[in-house]
Image (cartoon, helix red, strand yellow):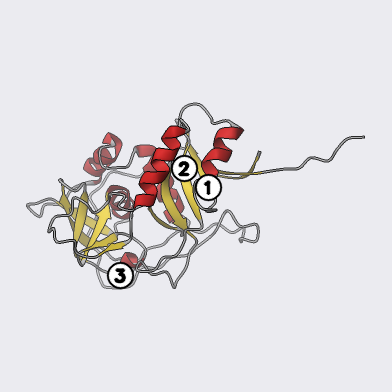
Amino acid sequence: MAATAAVTAGSRRRRNRAPAVGAGNDDAEEHHHNPFLETASSAPSRVQFRNVASRARWVEEAGATEVVESKGKLWLTTGVTRGGKLCYNIEEIGFLVERSALILLNDKDQTIGIENIYEKIAGGKYGCSWDTFQAYKHLKSLGYIVGRYGVPWTLKNSGTSDTNQSFNKVDGTCSDITKSLKEMHIDRLTPSFEVYLPNSMFKKSSPGAPNFLLCLLRNKPFSRVELEMLENNFGGIPLKYCHVDNNGRVSFLCFDEVALPSLP
């Protein structure tokens, strides 16, 4: 196996500030660029938002938010729907608040600042680590549609009124895969995200198969045999790998088999 694609981006530090309420109801505007396609334009592009800010209330028990006022069209490709309510998980909250596209409120309707949100992410107790957040926001800034692995975009009301189950992996396939990986002793590497190419026709109710799954690389690298065993567990969906170094640089990798010519 050989690494055949890599995309590296320097992490940019943002000033710590509470997001401001946007004026007007203009829709969100996204410009997309796909770094994994050879035919992609070489011109850089980023997600660009107009002056729009939705409002969401933090639910500590769920480790997520319930949106109380939605503006623009960001909800089409961000957040999950539970019992008719739009919810954002912690990496989505961080990404949107950084761009002043979301105002996060506590249970007293007071604004939660970006420093507090960073603390929640860095604590790693809400299903997302700091490195995972860096990978998420880099892909989103390039226009990809990104959801947590194994977490459905929509669920009908299951009869419970809370949001605690919103971000759990609910399908049996994920449990079977996790068990299989443990048996192979490589359960320390499992996908973090399902990633879709930019698609203006994307529907949460019928998203289809993701274009690839993203795994975070941690600690020592995996052997070729381990990677082959891992890739055989996801029904032909390509795997891509992400590494975040100590300086916050994000690298994305994929692996293909390469046949070398025989020497005379």
- What's under tag 2, amino acid-wise? Cys
Residue 252 relative to residue 65: left or right? right
Q: How far apart are marks 3 and 1 (CA)?
A: 32 Å
Residue 76, position in %: x, y?
A: 34, 67
> In the image shown, does 160 or 80 lie closer to the viewer?
160
Residue 247, position in %: x, y?
A: 45, 33
The first of marks 2 and 3 along the sequence is 3
Q: Mark 3 points at which residue?
A: 72
The first of marks 3 and 1 along the sequence is 3
Residue 51, position in %: x, y?
A: 31, 65
Q: Mark 2 points at which residue?
A: 215
Under circle 2, the secondary element is strand
Question: In this figure, what is the number of numbered marks?
Answer: 3
Residue shown at the point (33%, 53%) measured from the top left: 171
- What's under tag 1, amino acid-wise? Leu
Residue shown at the point (36%, 68%) measured from the top left: 28
Q: Name the residue under label 1.
A: 239
> In the image shown, does 208 or 113 lie closer to the viewer?
208
Q: Given contact means CB atoms under 8 Å apart, are the residues at marks 3 and 1 in contact?
A: no
Q: Given contact means CB atoms under 8 Å apart, are the residues at marks 2 and 1 in contact?
A: yes
Residue 106, position in %: x, y?
A: 12, 50
Residue shown at the point (44%, 49%) measured from the top left: 138
Q: How packed is label 3: few (under 14 Cα within 10 Å), some, or many (20 or more)?
A: some
Q: Which residue is outermost to the left?
A: 108
Q: How packed is label 2: few (under 14 Cα within 10 Å), some, or many (20 or more)?
A: many
